[in-house]
Image (cartoon, rainbow, N blue to C red):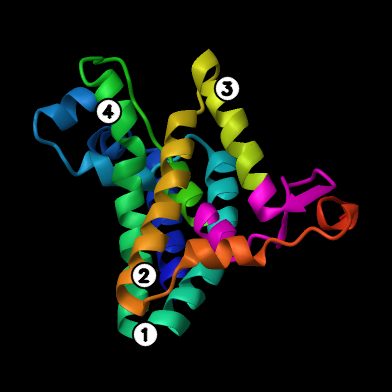
Amino acid sequence: MITATIIVITVLVSIRAFNDRVLTERLIFHPPSVKKGEWHRLFSYGVLHADYAHLIFNMFTLYFFGMDIERTCRSTLGETAGSLCFILLYLSALSISILPTYIKHRENALYFGLGASGAVSAIIFAYMLINPMNFMGILFIPIYLPAFLFGIIFLLISLALDRRQTGWINHSAHITGGIYGLVYMTVFFFVLADINLLQSFIGKIRIDSLSDLFHFGF
């Protein structure tokens, strides 16, 4: 499976880079270096992570949602086109999600970025688009919301945190990656399979009671 391959490669490179400063410096996102022509950094930063917690969280999330989106792409578009759709979604999301950061920090020699969060956000939002009424939550927090509502709240919180610019988390990459995942899947499925995912998304949303909006407990 493509998702599993991405996870294995990311885990192996990340773990090696924890103790290999030269490898990290070669792959990490560094805007001035990108500006000088090292375009590979727009992708390679995604196989690096700050620590084991960062790595495990991203890869666990990618496994859970990525496997579902990969199966959906293949079953709907066929093996070849579906596989290509998924690979391009992940790889292109790495570069697209980091572009706002590049534009903002392209002259900042002290800025460095790493982690697959932007691409993972694209996968999560692709899942939300296809499964808007599936319940989603945050790990270890026993409150679940339908995917469409979770996505809206996630974007609003990320926008607020990005404006405050607190902490080391790149919220703009999460926002850009999530929106890109929605746009990518909508366009790709419409062009290749004449499927209107936005129309399907709206049609699937059905709220008959409060139990359709909240779920408590693990």
Disc 2 residue crowd, few under 14, some 14–19, many 20+, Cα 10 Å:
some
As shown in the figure, which amino acid type bears the numbered disc 3?
Ala
Q: Would you say the residues marked 3 and 2 are in contact, meaning their CB atoms lie under 8 Å apart?
A: no
Disc 1 residue crowd, few under 14, some 14–19, many 20+, Cα 10 Å:
some
In the picture of the structure, the residue carrying the numbered disc 3 is: 160
Q: Quadrant of residue 115?
A: top left
| Distance from Cα at disc 3 to Cα at disc 2 | 32 Å
As shown in the figure, which amino acid type bears the numbered disc 1?
Glu
Q: Earlier in the sequence, mark 2 or mark 1?
A: 1
Q: Earlier in the sequence, mark 1 or mark 4?
A: 1
Q: Earlier in the sequence, mark 2 or mark 4?
A: 4
At x 50% / y 58%, what residue is drawn?
126
Q: Give the farthest residue toward the left.
A: 37
At x 55% / y 40%, what residue is drawn?
54
Q: Earlier in the sequence, mark 3 or mark 2?
A: 3
As shown in the figure, which amino acid type bears the numbered disc 2?
Phe
| Distance from Cα at disc 2 to Cα at disc 4 | 30 Å
| Residue 164 visible to the viewer | yes
Quarter of the picture holding the C terminus: bottom right
In the picture of the structure, the residue carrying the numbered disc 1 is: 79
Disc 3 residue crowd, few under 14, some 14–19, many 20+, Cα 10 Å:
few
Q: Which mark is residue 102?
A: 4
Measured as percent of width and height from the top left, residue 182 is found at: 45, 54
Question: Front-most of 16 and 159?
Answer: 159
At x 50% / y 22%, what residue is drawn?
162
Q: Would you say the residues marked 2 and 4 are in contact, meaning their CB atoms lie under 8 Å apart?
A: no
Circle 3: element type: helix
In the picture of the structure, the residue carrying the numbered disc 2 is: 190
As shown in the figure, which amino acid type bears the numbered disc 4?
Tyr
* Range of residues picked out in magenta: 124-149
Question: Front-most of 181 and 93?
Answer: 181
